[in-house]
Image: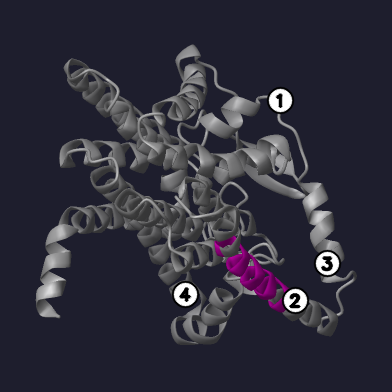
Amino acid sequence: MGLLNKQLLRRWRVELLCALGVWALLSVLALYIYSTGLLMPHGDAIGAYLGYDNYYRFTTRGGAWDVSHPLITPLYLINRVLLVPLLGEGGALIGILLASALLMAIAVAGCCGYLRRVVQLDTGRSLLLSGLLLSTFTVMTLSFTVESYPLSMALLVLSLLCLSSQLKQEKRLSGWQVTLWSLLLGGVTLTNFAKPLSLLLLSKEASLWQRVRKALLPTLLLLALVVAVGCFYQQRGASQGAEEPMLTAQVNDLLRFQTRSADLVPDFFGHPLLISDLEMRELHGETVLRPTPYDCWAMELLPWGVVLLLLSMIWVGRRDPLVWAIPLYLAVDVAVHLIGGYGLDEAVIFGGHWVFLVPMALGWLYHVLPKQAYRYMDLALLLLSIYMCTHNLSVILLHIK
């Protein structure tokens, strides 16, 4: 066992050191945000940043008050039953913020692992692209966000790393891996359940029935989980004298967030990576921070460049079908938000579901570029990372009240 542990440490030491370093950096940011009192409720006021569900809601409403995040319910119970009695409200919040920062560190390190193991980039370029992910507005903000998004992002990156590695080695996916990742992702955010299932399209199965069979078990298990959590909330709402049944409230919430954005591409593909600026805005009965339109032509090019990069993975995938995992994961978000129109007036908060695909796609792009262009691309990505980090961090800190 000791030899096995040493081999694992040696194999994953780069990712481990990356995770520890990123966790230290993001923990400092999260604890500073905590010190401002921004995230703690004052009377009936809700402490929040960008209007994410926050500590106030997490401690009083059971996390997400719906069946869209069924696995958040036990986390809520752990917080109320264990952390708060032991540490108090402030101590529990610090613990959750450190956990959020750790999840973001796992996501960044997982991205590095994907680039090294699946894309087979060298360590230096893998760390460079992981640094680009770290510099995004989404990763910085989720490090101090008490919501489902940090957990979703970490699990999404790990699922892509594990499933892509299995496809690379065995050309097919095992049923238990698909079931595990589908349940974990769907349990945190219901729509992400479809992402691991989509990779069955890349799995070399003996027949169509094999694919259907592997998708059927996680679907039934998740349905049972949703029903169980729905019954819990239904009974809790009835005992607390809720004005409307939980299912009715859930449907009304879905309809309330069916919106369209005037700046669709910048809102969805731009601000989660590079924020413009933030302004106070009334939204769904709350005063929240939301991005302002880009006021610089160079910034306006970024979201369109991201769209072209992600679309190019369809073409790059002709050489290696593993690349198609990136557009398959993205297709779920496109269907929910861009086609379904869900939550587009707050598209910036959904970046945790897809921003990690950008450095992964850039990693695959290295394989189709001539080697003479590598140094120029390295320099461009380094300068972009420095600019994004400086700009995003300054905007975050500027709007702390």
Residue type of the residue flagged with mark 3: Leu
Relative side of 280 to 320, left or right: right
Q: CA distance from mark 3 to mark 1?
A: 31 Å
Question: How many residues crowd mark 4 within 10 Å: few (<14), some (14–19), many (20+)?
Answer: many
Residue at figure coordinates x 64%, y 65% from the top left? 219
In this figure, which residue is indicated by the disc labeled 1?
262
Chief secondary structure of the magenta portion:
helix
In this figure, which residue is indicated by the disc labeled 4?
92
Frontmost of labels 3 and 1 is 3
Magenta stretch holds residue 227:
yes
Residue type of the residue flagged with mark 2: Tyr
Residue 175 in view, yes or no: yes
Q: Which residues are magenta?
A: 214-228
In this figure, which residue is indicated by the disc labeled 2?
233
State the SS at label 2. Answer: helix
Residue 247: mark in rendering: 3
